[in-house]
Image (tube, rainbow, N blue to C red):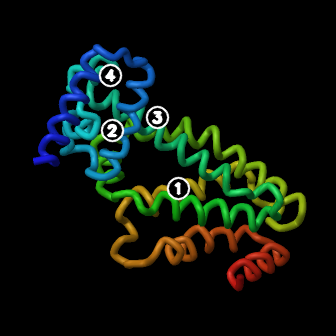
Amino acid sequence: MENIFIQIFSVSLRKIFHSGYFPINQMELRDQVIATSLRQFLKYGIKKVTVGKLIEPMGISTKTVYKHFGNKEDLLKHCLLLHYSELAKQYNNIGIENKNPVAAICELWHNAINLDFGVNHLFYHDLNYYYPQLQDAVLRKFFKKNFSEVHHIVVSGIEQGYFRDDIVAEIIPEVIGVLYSSITRTGQFKKFKLSATDLMHNTIDAYLRGICTEKGLKEIKKITKS
């Protein structure tokens, strides 16, 4: 009986809170909708989930959502911007500043894949299959901002003799990005049943070895032994 009362009280309180009786900052509500919807998208995928399902944990109506977003795709766009900005924060917190260029790139991409690999593959399947243009637009913003750091590391690695001096530094982040996307965004490698670490070793690690000098290869050997 007590549990039923608590449930009724909780539902009633949510209705009162979102009815406007208690004022709520609209920007804060908008941010809450984005954050909650992103968690739902990552959990259930995109295509089959409804707007109602997205905001179900908040206990608000879909009318409230449409006050802030034109449609589901508009909401998805803002969710993707949040998703990639959060990933960028985690990448920036990895602490690669004091490492040599080879160790920095290896740690950056190993951590990136481990952070990203746990996401439901249905999410990325739906994103790539049904919303490719939206995915590309958001990724361009993300990569333009964050790949400059990788480019800086590569240039530093060439100057210090870790990477070959006959490579074009601007191309390296692009190539790694393509490999990274194929690992985390598609099911292309799923048939091999490899862990994120093993996939990294057979793709991005293999590519990095190809652009390293003898000095760089020695660093990779140290990393793999540790």
Amino acid type assigned to the residue bearing label 2 in the image: Ser
Q: Which residue is mark 3?
A: 137
Residue at 76% in and 70% down: 212
Amino acid type assigned to the residue bearing label 4 in the image: Phe
Disc 1 is placed on an element classified as helix
Mark 4–mark 3 distance (CA, rounded to whole Å): 18 Å
Q: Quadrant of the C terminus?
A: bottom right
Mark 1–mark 4 distance (CA, rounded to whole Å): 31 Å
Rendered image: mark on residue 178: 1
Residue 207: percent from left, percent from top: 63, 69
Query: Which circle's residue, 1 or 3, is located before the other in the chain?
Result: 3
| Occupied quadrant, residue 209 | bottom right
Rendered image: mark on residue 126: none
Task: Indicate left or right for 85 with 149 as reference.
Answer: left
Amino acid type assigned to the residue bearing label 3 in the image: Ala
Residue at 15% in and 36% down: 8
Mark 4–mark 2 distance (CA, rounded to whole Å): 12 Å
| Occupied quadrant, residue 24 | top left
Q: Which residue is mark 4?
A: 69
Query: Which circle's residue, 4 or 2, is located before the other in the chain?
Result: 2
Of tags 2 and 3, which is closer to the observer?
Answer: 2
Of tags 4 and 3, which is closer to the observer?
Answer: 4
